[in-house]
Amino acid sequence: MAGSTAAASATHHDPSKRVCLVCPSLEQSTSASSGRGWLLMPDVHDARILLDELEAVAKKSDIGFDRVRAERFVNDTRASRAWLEATSPYVFEAVPAFRDKTTHRCDDVQQCCELGVRLVRGHGEYTCEDAARWYRDSGCCQSPENDLVQKTSWPPYLHLKDQLDGKVMWLSSANESNVLIMDVVQHLSKDAIFFEDTVVHVSQRADGWELDTTSGTRIRSKTLVFANGGFGAEATPDELEPLAVADTTYVHARNTRLLRELTIARSWELDDSNAWFVEFVDDQPKWFLWDARSTVVASDGAVYDESASYDERGRARRRLNVSVATLLYEVESSEERPNPEELGAARRSPSKDCDTRSKRLWRNYLAEMYGLGQPVSEAGCAARVEADTPVRRKTIYQGIIDTISGPKTDVDHRVRSDPTVYVAGNAGAPHLIEAYVGPGSTLGNAFVSGYAAGKHAALTANR
């Protein structure tokens, strides 16, 4: 997605320039394999509240955050969305949400506005204006017994005072809702000179860059845009250690480390080691702990809130340096029970609290769509194992989806150490915040950064 969007953006903003796209095949791209993917598009018109919330999350979780870059990303999101809808057959639509099994009433809304927010029980903090609008729309003023109107769109993982309501999106055409990402990628790539090949070597000359491919093709260009993902399973043990990942068995992505090696060879400024996180059980990604009751403990105590998203759980494990832990989950037919040490660790855990709609929706989405357990209420979503809970044990490993730590870049996605090189998608750190905000964070980041990098390269580069 990042590469094809960068190519289309560059061609659009300067049709006189030749744009080459090098990829083993469009069909094999990570974006294409996502099927009918979702994109997180934070194109809010007043970014102040969103940026304040992201900054607070970053501080609490020790996550990198650059407010200037984040604000530019919001603006670039708005521009990239307008560009695609004006130049293609596709439009962005908010992903419709499942109904929340837990029903909330008018009296779940805090009546007084305190410190600029109202608390809605089971949903989190909202701005005074948004909470008041929700309260009025639900008919609460006429009858305090009313149920609150349920939100119809899918939420992000981080609540952020509901500032990203309706921003988890999919792409649709006049003939089809939620189109294949492969179709979008092919459309975006149509005007580029496409090389179905793999770059194996990059070198810099006085007049620009040379790229050598597996087929022996040599491509010369004054400007490069790297958009082929991070270095994933090519990470070294020293690079995985700060992430608390034992080895590359627990890395989901399979990419080259071409940009990483170039960064090291050229002595460019390098971002700190970082990644999108996901845990592994039985050598498979464990995206959500959907079990009716689940508790994760490590050898030296408790770990995290099991109702959090996979990236949040992984970052908690990174902070605690927990590479290996034990997942206890309820199985009614089991004769096993938790032992006292495990229960003690569980009681010392951060509270497991399904106080936001996204936690309950993901838990019940998996249950309703794939039969993974039964849909649960707010209380059921937050339940942990107890002394009499029949359980099974699995080893749950710290893992990553892909690395997101490339050379340091400026607001235009240019490498700070060399303005002829751009970085988009997972090849570098995301500019909104260096964490997974919600469904579609990778595809949304790829699309927006590709658009911004391609536009800037077209309007400033010599070729």
Image (cartoon, grey):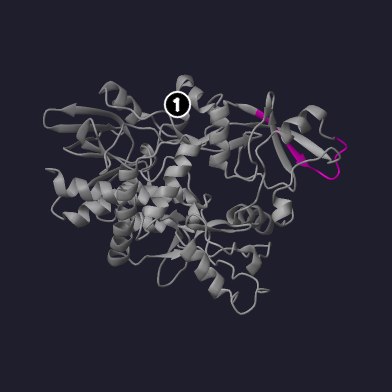
Position above or below: 46 against 143: above
Q: Residue at x 43, y 46 (%)?
A: 54
Based on the displayed image, in which of its 4 quarters is residue 91 positioned?
A: bottom left
Query: Which residue is the site of mark 1?
Result: 235
- Residue 21 placed where, x, y %? 28, 45
- Residue 369 placed where, x, y %? 65, 58
Q: Is residue 150 left or right of residue 270?
A: right
**Residue 77 falls within the magenta-colored stretch:** no
From where the camera sits, is residue 30 visible?
no
- Residue 362 placed where, x, y %? 61, 53
Mark 1 is on which residue type?
Answer: Ala
Q: Residue at x 70, y 31 (%)?
A: 297
**Residue 326 falls within the magenta-colored stretch:** yes
Based on the displayed image, in which of its 4 quarters is residue 212 positioned?
A: top left
Q: Residue furthest bottom?
A: 142
Q: How many numbered discs sit on the rendered protein?
A: 1
Q: Is residue 140 left or right of residue 179?
A: right
Q: Residue at x 27, y 43 (%)?
A: 411
Position above or below: 79 against 239: below
Q: Nearer the viewer, residue 7 or 103?
A: 103
- Residue 85 placed where, x, y %? 32, 65
Q: Residue furthest right?
A: 335
Position above or below: 280 against 148: above
Q: Which stretch did the figure color magenta?
A: 325-336
